[in-house]
Amino acid sequence: MKKTLTGLKPSGELTLGSLIGAIKQMKDYQEDYDSYLFVPDLHAITVPQDPKELKERIRKNVGLYLACGIDPKRNTIYLQSENLYHANLSWVLECTTYMGEASRMTQYKDKTSKGENVSVGLFTYPILMAADIILYDADYVPVGIDQKQHVELARDIATRFNNKYGNTFKIPEPLIPKTGAKIMDLQAPTKKMSKSADNYKGTILLLDPPETAKKKIMSAVTDSDNLVKYDPINKPGISNLLTIYSSLKEIPITEVEKHFQDYNYGSLKKEVAEVVATTLTTIQKKYQEIINSNIINEVLDAGREKTTKLAEAKLKEVYHKIGLER
Ligand code: ATP
Ligand code: LTN
């Protein structure tokens, strides 16, 4: 069976973008693939974190995975930090990655373009991400478009290693959703909806009260021509709302465009707001049942045990190939 693998950093609250770009894909594919969904908590500390908040968010992430419909029977769910082999393989891969290729990562370039003083970990994080993926021979990595370049780096790193030391790693492929590869900020629809945004009016959090989420949709920035059309370049705000609706209702964007063609912006927003609120209500109901139960610990214990064995075997193979043995 082919493997899918992805992770969502606990560096902030998960958003509607996280759901549509990554979690929903894992849910949709979970019947057909051997699925690995983890919490990249070591990635979260590439930027400063409050220890107490980080601990809470790690647990919240797992609770939200399950509440969003990720089936623990079909998915291996684990914490990156509980499996020491991720960071270990990452070191080996760092030593086979060129400064030039790591420096080309646009996310790093964007984050450092403002001249902020950043950690070395922020620079090397795509290499740790490559380790996360190739450690388990993942075939597909469901991610939003912003992560495509990182998966491509993982492919390059794995290919180079295989060429030099013999076939060791599967070459992973990014799986980008056809609709919703980049959900935009509701207040600045040319920017990605982000959990680390400055303005929370533009981001819908999965744990936002549904009424708050509705208000955020109702005050989304649009344009002034009052014409409902899917045109991300010229009408980014309206196109974003159509995309959210299309993805949550699982209706192709062309049909969504037809459905709304005679609507004015106010009534379009109202209907999108209803769909978003219903989605959040369903997730939050399940989340409340899960978050204080023991299921999170049970799932993570099983995940740690399974992935530690797999990762240990892979790292041993790598060490053997590169001559790290007595
Ligand atoms: P941030 O929200 O702070 O920008 P991030 O997206 O870099 O964080 P994660 O939460 O780890 O970090 O991302 C989880 C996954 O969700 C990734 O696959 C990412 O591509 C996807 N994703 C996040 N935001 C969006 C979005 N607005 N649209 C589509 N996919 C998204
Ligand atoms: N870098 C990703 C999170 C991440 C990930 C991964 C995604 C870490 N390791 C492995 C897919 C596969 C991010 O910032 N969103």
Image (cartoon, rainbow, N blue to C red):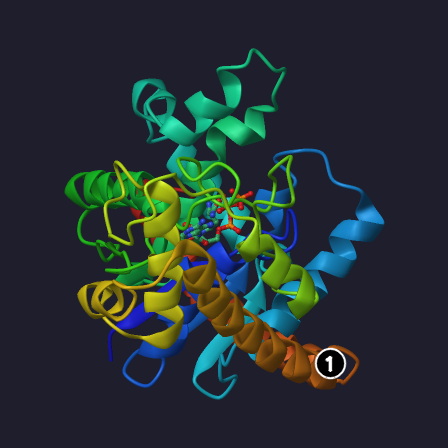
Taking the image as shown, residue 282 lies to the left or right of residue 86, namely right
Residue 259 % position (x, y): 26, 71
Return the residue nearer the eye: 188 or 126.
188
| Residue sitting at the far right | 52
Taking the image as shown, residue 290 lies to the left or right of residue 85, namely right
User: Residue visible at 72% across and 86% down?
Assistant: 289
* Residue 69 vertical position relative to residue 199 in the rendered view, above or below: below
* Residue to which mark 1 is pinned: 288
Q: Give the image quarter of residue 48.
A: top right
* Residue 174 vertical position relative to residue 103 in the rendered view, above or below: below
Q: Give the image quarter of residue 135.
A: bottom left
- The reply to whether residue 208 is visible in this rendering is no
User: Residue visible at 15% across and 41% down?
Assistant: 163
User: Residue visible at 54% across and 14% down?
Assistant: 114
* Residue 40 vertical position relative to residue 127 in the rendered view, above or below: below
What amino acid is at disc 1? Gln
Question: Where the N terminus falls, by quadrant?
Answer: bottom left
User: Residue visible at 77% across and 60% down?
Assistant: 56
